[in-house]
Amino acid sequence: MLNENLTLPKIGKAPSLLLLAMAIIFVFVSQDPNIADQTLQTVLLQNLFFHNFIHPHFSIFQFLFILLIFYIFRQGRVTLANSTFVERTIVFATGINIIFLMVNPNNDTENPILGMPLLSDPSIYVSLLLMFALFLNRNKLLIVAILKKLFIYILWIAALRALMLLILFFIGFGNITFFGVTSTLMEEDTLILFVLTSGIFLVLYFIRKKKIYLVVWFIFLFVQLLSFRRSGTLSFFLVNLTILIVHYFYGFNARKKTIVFFVLPLLVFGFITIVGSYDSLPKKYQMYVSRYVGAFVDLPSNYEYASESRNEHLIQSNESVFYAIENLPFWGFGYGRSESRSRYNYKGNTGIHNAFYNLWEQFGLFYLFYTLIFIFIFISEALKTFKYRRKYPYDYLLIRTSVLAFVLIFWINSWVLMIHNIIGFKMVVIRLFLLSFLFYVTPSNYYLIKHKFRRFKIKL
């Protein structure tokens, strides 16, 4: 049970600066391994903050989290006494998963310790320590206070970077040319993070009616559209559409519902008209339409942009599952075997866009089961939210919906994403923080957060 005090614990200047530094790294540093598609700045920042700090596989980012974990341990009290079954399950399952990773008989690393690749991925130990700090901490309001401050930093730093990206794009300094189009951003994990922040800004606009939030939302929209990358763009529309639907049913009065009821068909008709008028669109816009809808809708004559619109990732992903069931060993290929293993080949491509398949292929079936535990927990939280939707304060319901929509659509999208979006340390800790938000930010302490926000002159 949460101890619903009247005030949140104060976060001192030093830990606040630590959280600020972490937020900047979250937003400005990418873990996307597709180096060939990234700018020099992306590569330099990635090498600086995500690699080679003391140890080849340790990083400055991980070190900052160790400092945060130490702060949480010092301020709170880690104990099993007050933890729930779900909290204990998360920590226990993570420990078991790490053990399986280390004893995997297919591991083949250069410098094993006691016959095991104990230092092949130090981030898994930092993740486990973070779970102890978050889920077994007796002072849950301390976690809420940390989440509040970190989320504020991430929101506005993300808005700042999105604005910078848009300005750079329009003055001719966009990202690399991708399928003949200059992209605003090629960092897949950052574009996914922007989906989360855009949804929260849309919620803030619905709650507070401040135009600045809507302006920021449009900035994120254009960054996604002009990125020419589909995963982030599709997730953006699905997450924000989910928020809009919830707002329509629970936030609109009868008059507004009537307006939307008549306006929405016009927007759908406009979209259909644009697609139907594909041949008459300027070539530049034909490329964008082909990229985003050509894989799902038969366009009149988009043969010129067949390479941009093709999307065999779904077919590739579906076929990889049957291959996995018939051919992959329980243990996968283990650490150190990524280059020499015999991988599933789809039309000459061994980089299968299915994160779930890759979990089994690289680390074993047990890692896939471990991931499914988290999916089940998030689904449970979604069902809980739906069950109590009429009992929750409306603004709390909307923010909770934005988080759940983002996470659940992320899991669905992972069917055609690469594995780093699930196991990369940056995405792992985002997932843990969002899970902590769902666990510990309740209707009562949410209003404490609202009160605290006003001290930052950010009205919720």
Image (cartoon, rainbow, N blue to C red):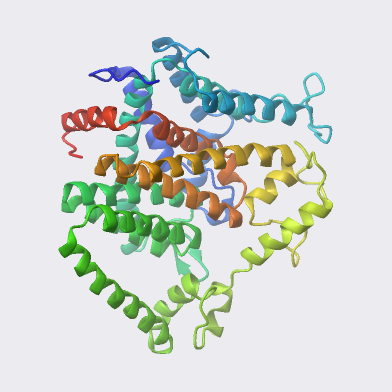
Q: Quadrant of residue 115?
A: top right
Which percent across, then down, holds residue 108? 81, 34
Residue nearest the observer in this picture, 375 or 121: 375
Say above or below: 194 vs 233. above
- Residue at 25% x, 44% y is 394
Which percent across, then down, holds residue 62? 52, 27
Residue nearest the observer in this picture, 143 or 58: 143
Q: Is residue 300 left or right of residue 243?
A: right
Which percent across, then down, holds residue 26? 43, 38
Which percent across, then down, holds residue 236? 40, 57
- Residue at 72% x, 25% y is 99
Quadrant (top left, top right, bottom left, bottom right) of the C terminus:
top left
- Residue at 53% x, 14% y is 80
Say above or below: 371 vs 10. below
- Could you tell me if residue 293 is visible in this image? yes
Q: Is residue 349 left or right of residue 150?
A: right
